[in-house]
Amino acid sequence: MRKLLTLITGMLLMGSFHAEAAEIETAKEAVKNMGVGWNLGNTLDANDATKTWKSTEEHEICWGQPVTKPELIKMMKEAGFGAIRVPVTWYQEIDSEGKINEAWMNRVKEVVDYVINEGLYCIINVHHDTGADKGSFKSWIKADETNYTQNRAKFESIWKQIAQTFKDYDQHLLFEGYNEMLDANSCWCYPTFYEDQKNYDANYAKKSLETINNYAKSFVTAVRYTGGNNMKRNLIINTYAASPGGNWGHANDVVEQFKLPTGESDHIIVEVHNYPNISSGFNSAKSNIDWIFSNINDKIIKKLNVPVIIGEWSSSNVDSGAGKTDYDARKEDFLKFAEYWVKKAKTLNIATFYWMGLSDGAYRSIPVFNQADLAETIVKAYHGSNFEGKFPSPSTETIEYVVTYVSDWSELFLYGDWNDNGIKVNAYKGIRVEMDKAYGDKLQVKIYGDKSGSEYKTQEVKLSANSATTTVDFDASKLGTNVYRITLQTMVGAQEARVRSAKLIKADGSEVDGSITVAWGCEVKSEAVPSGIRSVETVRTDGAIYDLQGRRIQQTLQRGLYIQNGKKYMVK
């Protein structure tokens, strides 16, 4: 009798764990059905360890992206994307005991609902709670044996809370346990990588990779425990640093020593990330790309008999700064790479999630694609060249950056950041700044050149008193041979200003966009200011004529605006 009572009591306590789950497709079916995906990056994953958030909105926009709206997700659906990865950072929204702030959980739920309501697959995760320590940021989840012992209970508690919140959601929602988890020394590629040439610690590396497997097990166990649809929900676990391995050093250890949690087979997915270097052109990078996919296929898909998603991908200099990314500097090669990458992945039934470009900053508020040609390339690489998605572009939209200066002499970046490698003065003529009005001596452009001792050489020019546009020519006699960053500095302390654009002017007269972000002592928000009619369909280059609703015109043209080869023209 005592044994029977014990059994009954245990069943009652574990009632949620044994609750019936809805029929959920297998992991392989889910990955195949996702198609091609996109990351809602720098949004719910944004964080700043130096600040305490007053609201979820303040947290969400702290890296310069606008508050996410359902219209953005609808645009992605209409373009042909089948899945959205929603990275989420939690450490600033949990108390000392690991309890999640209710308001933050509700905001995450709102964004998830935007995705689910469009019939798309949605992935949420624990994102920048992992990663490389830098400055005030210290990740609390590490591939380190001691770290796991100290933080296991907290990690499992967070996932139980997330899983409980979403346990009734259907198979379109997937959980990803952690993002790019690194060792205690923040080593990329593989544990103790930075010591490889001196005193590589094989024993520590082995334990570090075992810790990844332990964190994966804790994640899966915590989610399954909550019952409901979570008993069979498709779950995602990452390799060390989300690496697909490599054919050098100990890089392949991260996939060779990776293990699935015990008892998991039909509802588990492995995720990797990759940003290959194509700076020498697509053709020279192609063999490396082929090796990456071959390794994923051999070491994960075949060996573990599980599906794979590439949760983040682009080229290695996706964040290289204004005018320097592969999309800017070598677009033809970049578009070839993107097409090849997606097609290659599809042959292996791997779902791909592009990292956060395509629609960026205030363009997400409109919403439009500021990289419409790239979005179209990615989607058609998956669906086929005849696929007709909608790729609205910002043809006549104006974006204004609303800057609130709160400190004397505070600065807004117009180009570069504190770590930028700089540009050659002889390769660029200067910068043109367009404001909403003339500001005169209230603001100045400050250009940082070469260092003289411990200080940078600078060139400072006040904004025009008569025009909203100010052009500043680089003065090599003041700057030297390099420009490392350009800022817009307040001359009168606290004030508000509106920046419409910052264009770097190359020596040949062509222009590239600057990068308008916070430097220090200010806040910046972006707003879309309609200034005309924007195109709302795929950019056509077939010579045919379309009206502004994207309908092909067959009859004689009447007076009005039309689109041909992606450009507007008027029939009078």
Image (cartoon, rainbow, N blue to C red):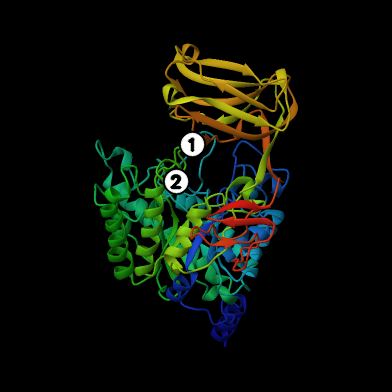
User: Neighbour class for label 1 at 10 Å: few (<14), some, many (≥20)?
Assistant: few
Say which element carries label 1: loop
Q: Residue at x 29, y 68 (%)?
A: 303
Residue 263, percent across and down? 41, 74
Relative to 292, is 347 above or below? below
Residue under label 2 = 327
Q: Is residue 289 left or right of residue 545?
A: left
Q: Is residue 237 visible?
A: yes
Relative to 172, is 402 above or below? above
State which quarter of the image contains the N terminus: bottom right
Residue 389, percent across and down? 54, 65
Say which element carries label 2: helix
Relative to 539, is 139 above or below? above
Residue 196, percent across and down? 27, 40
Looking at numbered disc 2 in the image, what kind of residue is underneath it?
Tyr
Relative to 489, is 452 above or below? above
Q: Residue furthest bottom?
A: 1
Q: Is residue 58 left or right of residue 328?
A: right
Which one is nearer the viewer's eye here, 79 or 174? 79
Tell which circle, 2 or 1, labels the residue nearer the N-terminal end.
Answer: 1
Q: Is residue 231 left or right of residue 279?
A: right
Q: Quadrant of residue 556?
A: bottom right
Which one is nearer the viewer's eye here, 390 or 207? 390
Q: Residue at x 35, y 49 (%)?
A: 276
Residue under label 1 = 134
Looking at numbered disc 1 in the image, what kind of residue is underneath it?
Lys
Q: Residue furthest right?
A: 495
Q: Quadrant of residue 490?
A: top right
